[in-house]
Amino acid sequence: MALHVHTEKADSKGHFEIFLLHFVLMLIAMAIFLAIILLLGNDLQWENYRRFYITFIPVTIILPLIVGITTALSYKRVVMSISPTSNVNVDKLKDFFFKEDYIIVDEKENYFHFERNKLIPRFLTLNYDKPTITVEENAVKINMLKRLSLVILPQFEFGKRYELNPESDKDA
């Protein structure tokens, strides 16, 4: 029996904070990049730096703005409902998150809460990237980032990896 997957939007939070973090980090990176270029050209003076900073506004201001907006928009969340529960291999689901560099921070009966394993990715997401797996009577619900769901969704729809008892093809 194949798994049925239904995806719907979930409440997302922290978009403005993530935008602000990535915008400021890119502003700093572009300011340092411009200073290094002027330093290599032996022309690092405040007047020249200010003039080039204003001249290259598309690189020094607009590019960080675009990076901040696209990064914040990539943190949309979805809830995937996979049914029937009796056919879902929850251990394989947990292995998927372990391979994506998550660790379990809260584990209860029929509930698993993950977060990023390493400090830098956790900092860059401001710790908003915390997927959960909830096993209910009629479906297994996974709350995760939309971009992560795009990785696992084809595996549910076209593969049999996450099925507990996959139907096997018999050559007769």
Image (cartoon, rainbow, N blue to C red):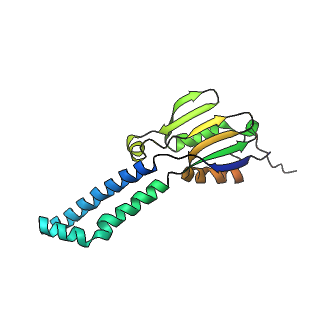
Residue 60 in the image: above or below residue 171: below
Horizontal side of 107 relative to 22 (left or right) equals: right
Where does the image place residue 31, in percent across and percent down from the top left? 24, 61
Residue 23 in the image: above or below residue 127: below
Which quadrant would the N terminus be assigned to in this image?
A: top right
Viewer-closest of 48 and 105: 48
Where does the image place residue 71, in percent across and percent down from the top left? 44, 56
- Where, by quadrant of the figure, is residue 79 drawn? top right
Q: Residue at x 76, y 43 (%)?
A: 166
Viewer-closest of 152 and 49: 49
Viewer-closest of 112 and 169: 112
Where does the image place residue 9, in percent across and percent down from the top left? 61, 50
Query: Which residue of the protein is positioned furthest toward the right in this rendering?
Result: 172
Query: Which residue of the protein is positioned furthest toward the top in this rendering?
Result: 109
Residue 96 visible? The answer is yes
Query: Which residue of the protein is positioned furthest toward the bottom in this rendering?
Result: 55
Residue 44 visible? The answer is no
Horizontal side of 41 relative to 167 (left or right) equals: left
Q: Residue at x 65, y 50 (%)?
A: 8
Q: Residue at x 30, y 58 (%)?
A: 27
Residue 107 in the image: above or below residue 5: above
Q: Residue at x 81, y 49 (%)?
A: 169
- Where, by quadrant of the figure, is residue 162 drawn? top right
Horizontal side of 164 relative to 55 (left or right) equals: right
